């Protein structure tokens, strides 16, 4: 049940790491088992034991902040007394937050050329469109949707547009809310004219202009909580590059819940290496070099 793709390791400094040693001297197998179980409980992320070495890197900041010297001490503390805040912080630190503006551009291009024009036509009466960037990480996906709309669909001004972004990690949600990005992130995937048009320059960083920020709302939410954070339906759900961290049962449950949030002409995008476990619920369409899914009606 290995779940971390090499792509998922980009940005961790470990993408090219090919060693087979997985543990430090002081941390026991039982400690790692305990941490993996804890992460599973809180985020449903399945961590492969062959990658136990990642705990050292990813938890280093948390250990420092808590005045702990190693993972053994952290596990001792956790075993001593249940502390849900600390447990959540551990699960959060173990998430992979890799993302970029217009990541895998094909879904955005398909939205531009085909899917959004049809949705707009279908929503002429309500003049309302709702998007959800589920597992939004630092917000680039949500802001990419906002830029796409601003750039290509001026007829939507005056419509009620909502772009919701949610993520398990409070840290990345705060960064999404700030709309502030270092140059290196801005340079990944954004055409130069978009940078000039939609960002303000402040020192080494770039901040999303208020007109885009106003279109997006971000909040912390666990996709594996008993209920999803929304009850109102969405027209487009982007649930990309997160299900690969879940087991089959979790994926199935999550997609059954997402199914209930989409009307018959609603659209679901998954990551390019992901697909619905239960195809009886989804009608799959291959277009523009990518796949999208519409809910089958029972
Ligand atoms: C690899 S990023 C993908 C970001 C974006 N969707 C994309 O495709 O670029 C995966 C994100 O999923 C989030 N995540 C992991 N488990 C989650 C859960 N149980 N509920 C909500 N978000 C979760 C992580 O915090 C991380 O930000």
Image (tube, rainbow, N blue to C red):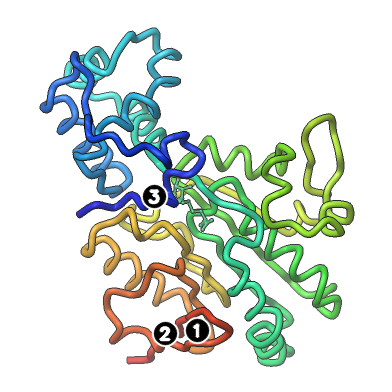
Residue wearing tag 2: 295
Q: SS of the residue at dot 3?
A: loop
Q: Between marks 2 and 1, how big is the CA–CA gap? A: 7 Å
**Tag count:** 3
N-term mark: 2 or 1: 1
Q: Tell us which disc is closer to us: 2 or 3.
A: 3
Dot label at residue 6: 3
Picture coordinates of residue 99, whole percent (x, y): 55, 51
Vertically, is 212 above or below 273?
above
State if disc 1 and disc 2 touch (CB < 8 Å): yes
In the image, what residue occupies the spot 22% across and 30% down? 21
Tell whether 257 sits left or right of 156: left
Marks 1/3: CA–CA distance: 35 Å
> Which SS class for mark 2?
strand
Decide: is 114 above or below 162. Answer: below
Residue 19: which quarter of the image? top left
State the residue position of label 1: 263
Q: Residue at x 48, y 87 (%)?
A: 286
Q: Is mark 2 within 8 Å of ligand 1?
A: no
């Amino acid at each position: 049940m290995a779940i971390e793709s090499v792509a998922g390791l980009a940005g961790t400094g470990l993408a090219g790491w090919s060693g087979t040693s997985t543990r430090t001297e002081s941390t026991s197998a039982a400690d790692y088992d305990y941490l993996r179980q804890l992460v599973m409980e809180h985020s449903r992320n399945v961590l492969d034991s062959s990658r136990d070495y990642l705990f050292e890197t990813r938890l280093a900041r948390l250990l420092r902040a808590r005045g702990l010297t190693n993972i053994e001490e952290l596990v001792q503390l956790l075993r001593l007394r249940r502390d849900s805040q600390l447990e959540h912080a551990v699960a959060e630190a173990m998430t992979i937050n890799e993302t970029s503006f217009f990541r895998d551009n094909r879904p955005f291009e398909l939205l531009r050329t085909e899917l959004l024009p049809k949705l707009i036509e279908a929503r002429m009466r309500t003049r309302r469109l709702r998007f959800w960037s589920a597992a939004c990480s630092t917000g680039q996906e949500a802001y990419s949707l906002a830029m796409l709309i601003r750039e290509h669909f001026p007829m939507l001004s005056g419509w009620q547009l909502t772009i919701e972004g949610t993520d398990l990690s409070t840290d990345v949600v705060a960064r999404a809310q700030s709309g502030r990005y270092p140059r290196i992130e801005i340079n990944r995937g954004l055409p130069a004219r978009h940078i000039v048009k939609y960002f303000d320059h402040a020192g080494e960083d770039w901040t999303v202009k208020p007109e885009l920020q106003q279109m997006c709302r971000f909040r912390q939410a666990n996709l594996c909580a008993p209920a999803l954070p929304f009850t109102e339906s969405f027209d487009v759900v982007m649930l990309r590059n997160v299900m690969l961290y879940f087991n089959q049962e979790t994926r199935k449950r999550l997609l059954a819940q997402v199914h209930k949030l989409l009307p018959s002409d609603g659209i679901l995008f998954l990551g390019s290496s992901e697909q619905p476990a239960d195809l009886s619920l989804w009608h799959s369409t291959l277009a523009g070099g990518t796949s999208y899914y519409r809910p089958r009606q029972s």
